[in-house]
């Protein structure tokens, strides 16, 4: 079929106008897919014009304008979400580092310090979830969430049970539940291996305090609130908590460093 | 390429755009324009994707490893312009199958409630 000049100019004009619209897409998306989008649009214009003439072109542009509007918003929103997510992950890495310092005050028995530490560590765990959640699957990422929620519930239980004598160490339960969630996540990372290296680190960073706290808690419950004064190995406990502090700092540093290095956020499904 | 095995169920339910793109790729690799035409044909023009929706979906599907890029070459049935071809990954195929089964079970429910005739085969063109 011999194309009339009108055919060529209408399709050509449409492609030129569409090219102008492509400028509005995010730079990275435009660079990667812009030429292909233009090519597809041009092919489709030719196809529609041959089938339905000018009327078809009007309908095509109605659909195209809607598609442009919808996809522009989606791509820009996704770009913002990715940047926000990246920033949050980096911030959560710092929260891990600062939180582990605050958490270490638990060695002096400070409830306030351990609470501040727990909150910051919880932010860190949410960042871990954002960074590696896709890789570890729903099972792995739910452990982190359960840890955070469990911590909140443990702290909420403190005023409720303050009259119960044998529960005097309940104020220290929050970080134990939180870090138990990290420990369980750590078990999953041993299998799924989401980190580029040191997949044992989340388990190593999580396990120490829960392993100390829960046996003591059970002992106190079973012994009418008696503190296991003479049975406690204080020095090993201090060493274990110090090791945990270092491991948490390293985990935080990995979150910060990997966000810096890749700038490629986790996929938003 | 990651060694982590993803669960197809995590992608369900698929959006109509993603489902139809995956369906278009079942019988072989295609470039963007032929995907677009096949989606229209498969859905009797009910699903019409513009280039923005098409490549936005392709971008996300590539990141989720549901599809992968094949190569860039000319389509012998069209002009000699080079076009980027895409194909299903194993994960994409499993995800598509799971979604098709999910939709089929919903059709069975609709039939059981007499909403659809037993021999329902979709709207006529």
Image (cartoon, grey):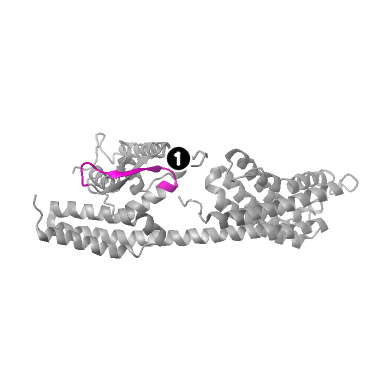
Q: Please, is residue A196 above or below residue A87 in the view?
A: above
Residue at (78, 46) in percent of width and height = A212
Residue at (24, 64) in percent of width and height = A17
Q: Which residue is mark 1?
A: B8
Labels in figure, total: 1
| Relative image position of residue A209 (x, y in whole percent) | 75, 49
Marked residue chain, label 1:
B
Magenta region, residue range: B62-79
* Residue A163 shown in magenta: no
- Quarter of the image that includes the C terminus of chain B: top left
* SS for callout 1: helix
| Relative image position of residue A243 (x, y in whole percent) | 76, 49
Residue at (71, 50) in percent of width and height = A247
Q: Is residue A226 visible?
A: no
| Relative image position of residue A201 (x, y in whole percent) | 67, 46
Question: Which is nearer the eye, A138 or B30?
Answer: B30
Q: Is A256 placed left or right of A176 in the picture?
A: left
* Mark 1 crowd level (few <14, some 14–19, many ≥20, 10 Å Cα): some
Question: Which is nearer the eye, A92 or B79?
Answer: B79
Q: Is A201 placed left or right of A81 in the picture?
A: right
Residue occupying the far front of the picture: B80
Specify the quadrant of the image occupied by residue A26: bottom left
Q: Is residue A66 visible?
A: yes
| Relative image position of residue A94 (x, y in whole percent) | 64, 60
* Residue B70 shown in magenta: yes
């Amino acid at each position: 079929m011999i194309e009339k000049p009108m055919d060529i100019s209408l399709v050509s004009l449409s492609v030129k106008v569409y090219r102008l619209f492509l400028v509005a897409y995010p730079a990275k998306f435009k660079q990667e897919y812009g030429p292909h989008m233009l090519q597809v649009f041009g092919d489709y214009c030719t196809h529609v014009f041959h089938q339905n003439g000018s009327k078809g072109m009007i309908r095509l542009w109605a659909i195209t304008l809607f598609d442009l509007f919808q996809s522009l918003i989606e791509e820009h929103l996704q770009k913002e979400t990715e940047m926000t997510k990246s920033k949050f992950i980096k911030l959560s890495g710092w929260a891990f580092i600062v939180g582990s310092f605050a958490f270490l005050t638990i060695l002096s028995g400070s409830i306030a310090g351990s609470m501040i530490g727990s909150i910051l560590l919880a932010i860190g765990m949410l960042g871990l979830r954002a960074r590696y959640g896709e890789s570890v699957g729903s099972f792995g990422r739910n452990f982190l969430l359960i840890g955070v929620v469990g911590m909140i519930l443990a702290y909420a239980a403190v005023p409720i049970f303050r009259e119960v004598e044998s529960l005097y160490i309940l104020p220290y339960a929050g970080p134990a539940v939180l870090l138990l969630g990290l420990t369980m996540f750590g078990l999953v990372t041993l299998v799924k291996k989401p980190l580029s290296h040191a997949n044992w680190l989340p388990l190593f960073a999580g396990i120490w305090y829960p392993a100390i706290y829960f046996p003591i808690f059970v002992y106190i419950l079973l012994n009418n609130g008696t503190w296991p004064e003479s049975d406690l190995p204080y020095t090993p406990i201090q060493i274990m908590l110090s090791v945990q502090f270092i491991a948490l700092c390293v985990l935080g540093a990995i979150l910060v460093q990997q966000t810096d290095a890749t700038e490629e956020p986790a996929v938003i499904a | 390429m990651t060694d982590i095995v993803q669960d197809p169920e995590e992608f369900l339910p698929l959006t109509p755009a993603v489902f139809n793109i995956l369906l278009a790729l079942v019988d072989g690799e295609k470039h963007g324009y032929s995907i677009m035409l096949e989606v229209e044909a498969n859905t009797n023009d009910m699903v019409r994707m513009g280039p923005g929706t098409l490549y936005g979906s392709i971008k996300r599907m590539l990141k989720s490893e549901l599809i992968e890029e094949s190569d860039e070459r000319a389509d012998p049935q069209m002009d000699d312009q080079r076009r980027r071809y895409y194909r299903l990954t194993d994960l994409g195929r499993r995800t598509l199958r799971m979604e098709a089964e999910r939709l089929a079970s919903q059709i069975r429910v609709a039939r059981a409630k007499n909403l659809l005739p037993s021999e329902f085969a979709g709207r006529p063109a």
